[in-house]
Image (tube, rainbow, N blue to C red):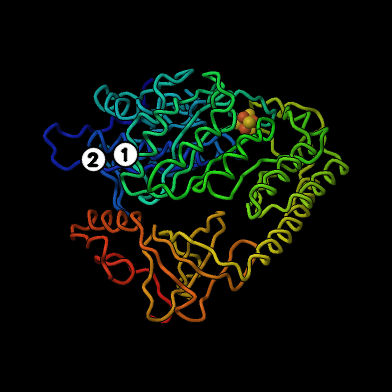
Amino acid sequence: MSSTLPAPIAEPATTSAPRSYEVRTFGCQMNVHDSERMSGLLEAAGYVKAPEGAEPDVVVFNTCAVRENADNRLYGHLGQLRPVKERHPGMQIAVGGCLAQKDRDTILAKAPWVDAVFGTHNVGALPALLERARHNDEAQLEILESLEVFPSTLPTKRDSVYSGWVSISVGCNNTCTFCIVPSLRGKERDRRPGEILAEVQALVDDGAIEVTLLGQNVNSYGVEFGDRLAFGKLLRACGQIEGLERVRFTSPHPAAFTDDVIDAMAETPNVMPQLHMPLQSGSDRILREMRRSYRSAKFLGILDRVRERIPHAAITTDIIVGFPGETEEDFQATLDVVERSRFSSAFTFQYSQRPGTPAATMAEQLPKAVVQERYERLIALQDRIAAEENAAQVGRTLEVMATAQPGRKAGETHRLSGRARDNRLVHFSVPEGAQAPRPGDLVTVTVTEAAAFHLIADPADPADYSLRRSRAGDAWDRSQADSCGVPAPGAGSTGRGVSLGMPALPVRGA
Ligand code: SF4
């Protein structure tokens, strides 16, 4: 497949400066994790991450085909890069991910200045395709129909030292009519438990104390090797890993969510009291049209059993509003299930036609105005419930793992941010004179205020705040030291906040 642009100027073989790269990610957590692999592969091949604000030699787009206008957005970004590439000798652009799997050669037809296109099944080919494109001076397109290597066996560069993602399966055997995943990611492929546990152990050895198990449909894990109870067993096995403090997973499917998984969650202390359970619709008629095989009563029954066994579990969900043929009565059924489910938060989507999905060709597509109006009613209801559920947290004492991302208002409030065990976002302040956590350290604080999307903990005095410095915080120190060349203090350091010349986390009153 030839490029119509002037040939990119190949770097001389003797060049000493390594080529820099940037990976731009669109879409879901699966893509975020795939992007970590792309970075890992590029670094293993000798590329270095481009510094913030610098113009990289290689830009990789990891695309998503699920969101509305995904293709317009991609071509917009590619169009902006064209003049940059023209004045940057040797620059290369690669496009991977779901949209590449779906659009294939269309990408090179529409944006012939792209150098490499690869699909969801051959992420590992990225460095070779870039190299081949440079060597042959010709754009490379390689899309596979199915996986040859399980992606988790590829090198990965993690974005966070204190927590990591581990794929347990890829693909999906369901056929939800709104979803493009089965046609782009293929049938479910399960990784062997031993391999998964070895990867979890490696992350923990590296300093992580939190791991999220990842799959399109985690609770059907085991279907490929004939063990229906495999996911619950995997959770229990994670409970045996010393030093692993927080285990999460996403996403399960209500149809296959069995009580043995609830038991494993309740009986494994490091599995967090949190569940993301996609509802999609509260109307049984619409669920049938969506080809989702559970019904609202079953969904509510799962939530009841989870809360019976794990009383403080925070449950989140996904909901689609305005699926083709949805009547006001169907929508009311969704509102009713949302009211009864008491979700701590919800990802809400307005239905829009996705080419290639069965629902895109269904009759009775709803007018945008109707979908918008229902969407706003759903948001208003869910925001009220989230605010009420969070208000009930005021006065509770929570263990919060500090994260590296400051809250939006951290500059004014001087609060730090972190995640509670149930994954609620908590902004907390450090009392005057107390030691601040590093990202990955754990603080214990009492909630003093609540809003719909976060909790606030402002300890009145130092006795209301305690800090536990963790291996993950030590790993954070080491990673910062590695990146700036200053030796890290040992685990017993009493330095305040993040040291080593890195930006200090804000401390209230400091
Ligand atoms: S369960 Fe349904 S929505 Fe989820 S990935 Fe599979 S087909 Fe898509």
The disc placed on residue 58 is 1
Q: Is residue 185 above or below residue 442?
A: above
Dot 1, how many residues are within 10 Å of its Cα: few (below 14), some (14-19), or many (20+)? Answer: many
The part of the image, by quadrant, that contains residue 325 is top right
Front one among 240 and 364: 240
Residue drawn at (53%, 19%), measured in percent from left and top?
224
The part of the image, by quadrant, that contains residue 140 is top left
Ligand 1 contact, mark 2 (Cβ < 8 Å)? no
Q: Are marks 2 and 1 in contact (CB under 8 Å)?
A: yes
Of the residues under marks 2 and 1, which one precedes in the sequence? 2
Q: Position of residue 20 (x, y in %)?
A: 27, 43
Query: Which type of secondary structure does the marked residue at label 1 adopt?
Result: strand
Query: Would you say 420 lies left or right of 23 here?
Result: right
Query: Would you say 12 lies left or right of 302 here?
Result: left
Ligand 1 contact, mark 1 (Cβ < 8 Å)? no
Q: Quadrant of the C terminus?
A: bottom left
Residue drawn at (80%, 49%), measured in percent from left and top?
335
Q: Position of residue 8 (x, y in %)?
A: 28, 32
The amino acid on which the numbered mark 1 sits, given as a three-letter code, is: Val
The amino acid on which the numbered mark 2 sits, given as a three-letter code, is: Arg
The disc placed on residue 19 is 2
Query: Would you say 285 lies left or right of 117 here?
Result: right
